[in-house]
Image (cartoon, rainbow, N blue to C red):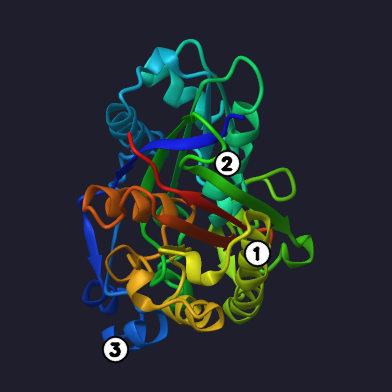
Amino acid sequence: MLNVQIKAMGHALPTRVLTNSDLEKMVDTSNDWIIETTGIIERRIAEDSTSTSDLCYDAAVMALHNAKVKPEQLDLIIVATVTPDMPFPSTACIVQKRLEAWNAAAFDLAAGCSGFLYALSVAEKFLFTNGYNYVLVVTSDILSKITDYTDRNTCVLFGDGAGAAVLGRGNSSGDAGILSTYLTADGRGADLLYMPAGGSALPASEQTVREHLHYLKMNGREVFRFASKAMVEVSENLLEKAGLGYQDIDVFIPHQANMRIIKTAMKNMQIAEAKTLITIDKLGNMSAASIPVALSMAVSEGKVKPGDVILMVAFGAGLTCAGAIIRWGWN
């Protein structure tokens, strides 16, 4: 039997740093309050001239180089984002053009902060079919461009970045690869984290711009409640499907949304902090890019070793929640 492996990772981060001290000058907040409430010290912010496809391209180039896969070998490109370059064409097609990956199909996927894990699961299914050998999954969000910097409850949270993974087929079901995936959603929470205007429901107008409806809106308390419960439920489902227990997890990569949520998940799952990858303090919440950036950085820094069993869980707008367990392999 064949299985699906992540062959290599890549990531891209803007160079501009937005600190809590900077935010103190922009909105009614304080460094101490931000750290106590979120665990964030600073975040990366894209330049005005930078688009989502720019960060996607840079992360993709790194992942392809690390995987020793040429763009023309790609069969599919999936871009997970809620900040596409434009409504259409898909950002995936723009990335395909820049990579010159002419043999690949391409489409975007929108699952909020769960986007990487949704795309990972979709890519796995394609690789189980004939004709698909390599799939590029890229996740990027430039949330700074849809963040209201007059809203102190949300503007302190978000940063920009991109992560990429090259997926391919492994040798056997017993080798390194994806051990289990799980996707879920609860549309009853669709109004808890959303951007009201810019679509067919509320097309752009003078009124929507004046009322700040092109910025994201979030009910933080209710999202916290959903995340604390859903992350545990998804993790337990993943472990059952993989025939594993929490004691078998070597590396835990939670969505980097809020340090309180991460600590709650660690406590409920009885996973030690030493096994948990944390980037939120320096990078903030990068939406769908949070998990792949954390994994890519950890691989680059030698914090993930061949044979490590990795649990990844995320939640996001929708409300969505998703997870995957992989055994990291040898390139």
Q: Are marks 1 and 3 in contact (CB under 8 Å)?
A: no
Of the image marks 2 and 3, the number of the one nearer the N terminus = 3
**SS assignment at label 1:** helix
Q: Residue at x 45, y 57 (%)?
A: 310
Examine the rendering and report whether any part of residue 320 can be seen: no
Specify the amino acid type for callout 2.
Answer: Ala
Provide residue 295's location: percent of width, then percent of height.
36, 52
Q: Residue at x 60, y 77 (%)?
A: 228
On-image quarter of the C terminus? top left
The mark lying in front, picked from 1 and 3, is 1
Q: Is residue 295 left or right of residue 22?
A: right
User: Crowdedness of circle 2 by 10 Å Cα count: few (<14), some, many (20+)?
Assistant: many
Residue assigned mark 3 = 32
Provide residue 329's location: percent of width, then percent of height.
39, 42
Residue assigned mark 1 = 234
Q: Quadrant of residue 239?
A: bottom right
Q: Spatial distance from mark 2 to mark 3, Cα to Cα?
A: 36 Å
Query: Which residue is nearer to you in this view: 89 or 313?
Result: 313
Provide residue 190's location: percent of width, then percent of height.
72, 62
Provide residue 252's location: percent of width, then percent of height.
44, 65
Specify the amino acid type for callout 1.
Answer: Val
Specify the amino acid type for callout 3.
Answer: Asp
The mark lying in front, picked from 2 and 3, is 2
